[in-house]
Amino acid sequence: MNDEHAQSRNDFVDVAVVGLGPVGITLCNILGQRGVRVVGIDASKEVYALPRALGMDHEVMRVFQNIGIADDLAASVSAYKDSEYHAADGTILRRFTSPPLPHSQGWPAYMTFVQPALEGQLRRKAASLETVQLRMGTEVVSLKTPETPKLMLRDCVTGETTALGARYVVGCDGGSSFIRRSLGIAFEDLIFDQPWLVVDMILGDHARDLPETNIQFCDPVRPHTYVVGPDRLRRWEFMMLPGENPEDINRPEWIWAQLAPWLKPGEAEMWRSATYRFHALVAESWRVGNVFLAGDACHMTPPFLAQGMVQGIKDAANLGWKLAHAVHGGSDLVLETYQQERRPFVHKVISITKALGHIICETDPEKAATRNTDMMALMATGKGTQVRQSLFPPIQQGLLAVGHDGQLVPGAGEMCPQPWIITAMGRKRLDDVVGSSLVLLTSGLPLGANICDRAAQAGLEVFAVGTSTDSSVYEEEDVLSGWLNLHGVRAVIVRPDRVVFGTAETESGIAALIDQLETKLGLIGSDAALARRSG
């Protein structure tokens, strides 16, 4: 059934995922691991062979960990270097760093990766799942009745067409999304439009030493970027100037002239060069009927914080467990929280990235000089260095617990920390011990049988994490307990996407959280409840 060339005998599935780039194939994995019958559709038979995205954060790596490919990615992933903004004369204008150890999510805060290798691992994993079918070399030629979606598919080789019905459809088919256009959804334009040339180079054995720091060159003559990739991969990005066109600059001789301060021909091999227009766009709606959008199909961000693919993977993580919840009998009202949570968050991320882009892309010499003076003053006061992850707020609305005052309870909307756990089975990351279900974690709060039973009835796994070697299960460092102490609580309910639903200090507080969770999820009909009945 999992052979990518096989055609399903069924004409109806739980979820059809259109587009199998990193976002779509991640969503297929999340759904397949939850027993959802999913068909992934892509016009190309092969993984795109050239790199595009280059950076991902610890939350995305945690998604891949839960999919089960983290170890397989080791050879194509490396820690992201600190980033600096340089004036034309080399003066440092701003510095972005990573948070100190220990890693709050169990992984380095930011990483670089090789996209073709990543996508290959994701496709192989998806193809191994019982309920996943990948239809490669197949394009969607029509989408009808979004309330009860019907797709018409065409084999790209034979031209044969087949119909497919699905309870839900998710368009992960990129910036020119056929699904988005079929739904008539417009973009909100956040007003950023800059053409750039992107060049990926593989360093040779005798390449000269290059910086080990990522650098944004805020040079009004030509803004440009240098990024340290995994192993010998290095990326340069050059802003196109007024009057230039892609055909003129995307030529080896022009590119090597720009690379001259770093490389000579023969010191590196050009893997690819491509021109892009960097946009800042957010779809007005992320859902029509039972058809959803994810990734570039519903948002596009400039690359200055490497958030494009990152936010797409987080779309998949947010939507995936909610779709599975609805498919397995839970209330589909939970699906309304997808756009409610993700769109404002992505809007904020793009706005922050766009603001940085305007700083980098300034070509007026006088404005650039004023910018430099202002930023150097911040550096002198110690305010010019930031932790990259501190730029973005947590989710601030949606499927989250609120207190008596109507405000979110402490920690709700944040990512739950993932400590290293010491157990009788050895040293493991938290998710590898508790899985990716709904979970109630406690630290220093013994629970009675009644509250444990109450949690189990709501489909929650219950897991106590000790803080010292006196416990049979304890965290290696005070990552989780430190976070709980920061918020003045001793228990946390974590969603399958590892977002914190809510926190509590006492058993009665946990009971109140569970009441809210059941109300918001309609857990009576969920897969957890159904499993309990069948058991």
Image: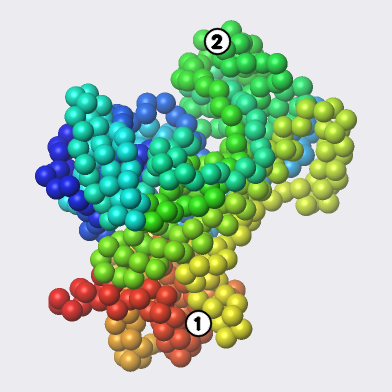
Dot 1 amino acid type: Ala
Towards the viewer: 457 or 205:
457
Q: Which mark is residue 504?
A: 1
Q: Of the two numbered discs 1 and 2 on the same chain, state the one appearing first in sequence.
A: 2
Q: Compared with residue 32, is residue 514 higher up or lower down, i.e. above or below?
A: below
Residue 6's image quarter?
top left
* Mark 1 surroundings: few (<14), some (14-19) or many (≥20) residues within 10 A: many
Q: Check if mark 1's residue and mark 2's residue have beta carbons within 8 Å.
A: no
Q: Which quarter of the image is occupied by the N terminus?
A: top left
Q: Which mark is residue 344?
A: none
Q: Residue at x 49, y 72 (%)?
A: 400
Q: Residue at x 57, y 12 (%)?
A: 247
Horizontally, residue 71 falls left or right of residue 371, namely left
Q: Is residue 199 visible?
A: yes
* Mark 2 surroundings: few (<14), some (14-19) or many (≥20) residues within 10 A: few
Which residue, given by chain and number where applicable, does mark 2 sit on?
252
Horizontally, residue 272 falls left or right of residue 376, namely left
Dot 2 amino acid type: Pro
Q: Which quarter of the image is occupied by the C terminus?
A: bottom left
Q: Residue furthest left?
A: 9
Q: Residue at x 38, y 32 (%)?
A: 116
Q: Secondary structure at mark 2?
A: helix
